[in-house]
Image: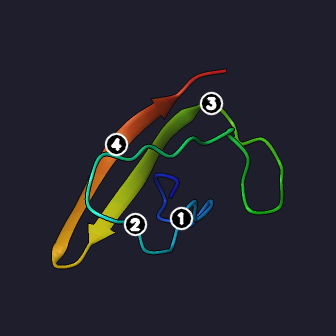
Amino acid sequence: FDVNGSKIIELFNNYKPAGTHSIGWDGKNEKGVKVSAGIYLYSIDVGEFSQTKKMIFLK
């Protein structure tokens, strides 16, 4: 999400078994367009656990 709350992209929405996982992001939105440098929010939802954090995207 951008700082206005607009969805940029959903990177993953499937089942993963327990363990450590990583997901990369190439800086593109759902239309394949590179986003601007700035502050973005990401959300992780697993079962009843949900957490949103801030990240800074630099070009």
Q: Quadrant of residue 30?
A: bottom right
Of discs 1 and 4, which sits in the foreground?
1
The tag on residue 12 is 1
Identify whether 49 is placed above or below 57: below
Question: CA–CA distance between discs 2 and 1?
Answer: 10 Å
Of discs 2 and 4, which sits in the foreground?
2
SS of the residue under disc 1: loop
Looking at the image, which is closer to me, 29 or 37?
29
Q: Position of residue 37 (x, y in %)?
A: 62, 30
Return the residue at label 3: 37
Nearest to N terminus: mark 4 or mark 3: 3
Of discs 1 and 3, which sits in the foreground?
1
Q: Residue flagged by tag 4: what amino acid is it? A: Lys
User: CB of mark 2 within 8 Å of CB of mark 1?
Assistant: yes
| Neighbourhood count class around disc 2 (C-alpha, 10 Å): few under 14, some 14–19, many 20 upward | few
Residue for point 57% across, 65% down: 10
Nearest to N terminus: mark 1 or mark 4: 1
SS of the residue under disc 4: strand
Q: Quadrant of residue 16?
A: bottom left
Q: Position of residue 25 (x, y in %)?
A: 61, 42
21 left or right of 13 in image: left
Residue for point 33% across, 61% down: 44
Residue for point 40% across, 36% down: 55
